[in-house]
Image (spheres, grey):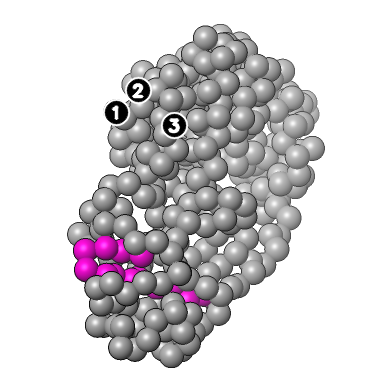
């Protein structure tokens, strides 16, 4: 592996009037990246035994989720579903319960779909082919590149937001990284320049630098960066201007009323429609708009005489990628035998073990499932 002396040598070459091309700059980044990764890589459970299945599960979980939050979910998931055939056979209810709290539940559903296909098409294993990995549900270019390179040593790039940020700053590129055309060009550049005999470590090193040093949403730790002698954005003092992203559209704000309803040892739940936001998941019953107390009872279809307890709960908010819910909540304890068409009643302990409730309802679910 190279030493920091490499940084000085490269700076001398560029001062002499021969700036590096993008391809040369990325190739020059490989040795310092690999050297740094060998000494600074975090100890993570999915790195202990990077089988194709382990890499796949971890990468899907890590989408839209922090590393620290994923660790416990990953270990619990593998204990319950240790291999691809087990994932293919698991009932959806149990799968979603294992996924509860990670959000973006279609990720879990696509895992099962892909596992079922892999059992039929590839003998119960993930294929050692980038193109065939891409053919499975829920596996895009990033995930396929991660599995191919880390588990199989195939020299394919794995370009996520961290990698786009690092390479954009390295090259002082002002291209919009949210454009698919820019991502594809970045993938092509890395595919042509990455070390063929260390593709997995190279991809992980880029991701790790992006996560720990060339950080999102904060000041990059340039003095700690293995690429500090190569980075054009750092040299030009424009790291805060790069990467360039098209501003996101403002989220739609929706007001909702949510009910935490008890009846003896039972809780009231509702299953969402098969399409749309939180499709097919269980939820606490609720409706659009902020309802007053009398309006809330009317919506539930019960009379005041049917109620043992009715009290407002603190307002709550949940932010999805494109929608923000601002929620008003009520705790309602119904008398024995009282019915409502707002959902179905389930034994509280059975519901706690069986049904996955999306994180959007966490503030109110604590009323039903304390502890």
Between 219 and 5, the residue placed more toward the observer is 219
From the viewer's perspective, tell me whether residue 166 is left or right of residue 88.
right
**Dot 2 alpha-carbon crowd within 10 angstroms: few under 14, some 14 to 19, many 20 or more:** some
Secondary element at image label 1: helix
Q: Residue at x 70, y 52 (%)?
A: 245
Indicate which label's residue lies in the foreground, 2 or 3.
2
CB under 8 Å between callouts 1 and 2?
Answer: yes
User: Which numbered disc flags the more N-terminal residue, 1 or 3?
Assistant: 3
Find out whether residue 258 is within the magenta segment.
yes
| Labelled pair 1, 3 in contact (Cβ < 8 Å) | no
- The reply to whether the C-beta atoms of the residues labelled 2 and 3 are less than 8 Å apart is no
Q: Residues within 10 Å of mark 3 (few under 14, many from 20)?
A: many
- Give the alpha-carbon distance from disc 2 to disc 3, as whole Å: 13 Å
- Mark 3 residue element: helix
The percent position of residue 100, horizontal first and vertical second, equals 39, 47
Percent position (x, y) of residue 60?
50, 35
Chain part drawn in magenta: 256-269
Quadrant position of the C terminus in the picture: bottom left
Q: For the view shown, which residue lies furthest in the front direction?
A: 337
Seen in the picture, residue 98 relative to 288 is either above or below; the reply is: above
Q: Main secondary structure of the magenta part?
A: strand
* Residue 108 part of the magenta-drawn span: no
Q: Which residue is drawn at the image coordinates 39% and 22% (left, top)?
A: 86
- Residue holding disc 1: 79
Q: Nearer the N terminus, badge 2 or badge 3?
A: 3
Residue at the image point whose x is 26% and y is 50% from the top: 350
Is residue 296 depicted above or below 135 in this figure? below
In the drawing, what numbered circle is on residue 58? 3
Mark 1 crowdedness (10 Å alpha carbons): few <14, some 14-19, many ≥20? few
Check residue 82 in the rendering and tell me which mark sits there, or answer none: 2
Task: Give the number of the mark in front: 1 or 3.
Answer: 1
């Amino acid at each position: 592996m190279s030493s920091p002396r490499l940084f000085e040598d490269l700076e001398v070459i560029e001062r002499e009037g021969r700036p590096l091309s993008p391809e040369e700059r990325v190739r020059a980044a490989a040795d310092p990246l690999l050297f740094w990764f060998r000494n600074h890589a975090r100890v993570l459970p999915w790195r202990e035994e990077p089988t194709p299945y382990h890499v796949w599960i971890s990468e899907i979980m890590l989408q839209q989720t922090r590393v620290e939050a994923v660790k416990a979910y990953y270990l619990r998931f593998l204990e319950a579903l240790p291999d691809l055939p087990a994932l293919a056979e698991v009932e959806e209810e149990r799968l979603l319960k294992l996924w509860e709290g990670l959000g973006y539940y279609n990720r879990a559903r696509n895992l099962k779909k892909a596992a079922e296909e892999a059992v039929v098409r590839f003998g119960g294993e993930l294929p050692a082919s980038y193109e065939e990995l891409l053919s499975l549900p829920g596996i895009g270019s990033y995930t396929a590149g991660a599995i191919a390179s880390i588990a199989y040593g195939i020299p394919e790039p794995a370009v996520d937001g961290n990698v786009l940020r690092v390479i954009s700053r390295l090259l002082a590129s002002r291209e919009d990284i949210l454009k698919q055309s820019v991502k594809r060009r970045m993938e092509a550049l890395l595919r042509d320049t990455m070390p063929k005999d260390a593709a997995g470590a190279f991809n992980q090193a880029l991701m790790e630098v992006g996560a720990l040093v060339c950080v999102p949403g904060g000041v990059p730790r340039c003095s700690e960066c293995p690429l500090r002698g190569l980075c054009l954005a750092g040299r030009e003092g424009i790291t805060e201007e790069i990467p360039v992203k098209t501003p996101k559209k403002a989220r739609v704000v929706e007001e909702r009323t949510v009910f935490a309803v008890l009846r003896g040892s039972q809780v009231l739940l509702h299953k969402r429609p098969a399409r749309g936001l939180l499709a097919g998941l269980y939820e606490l019953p609720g409706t659009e708009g902020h309802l007053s107390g009398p309006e809330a009872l009317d919506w539930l279809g019960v009379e005041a005489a049917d109620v043992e307890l009715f009290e407002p709960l603190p307002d709550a908010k949940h932010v999805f990628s494109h929608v923000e819910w601002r929620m008003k909540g009520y705790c309602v304890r119904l008398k024995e035998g009282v019915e409502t068409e707002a959902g179905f009643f389930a034994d509280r302990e059975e519901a706690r073990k069986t049904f996955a409730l999306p994180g959007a309802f966490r503030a109110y679910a604590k009323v039903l499932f304390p502890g």
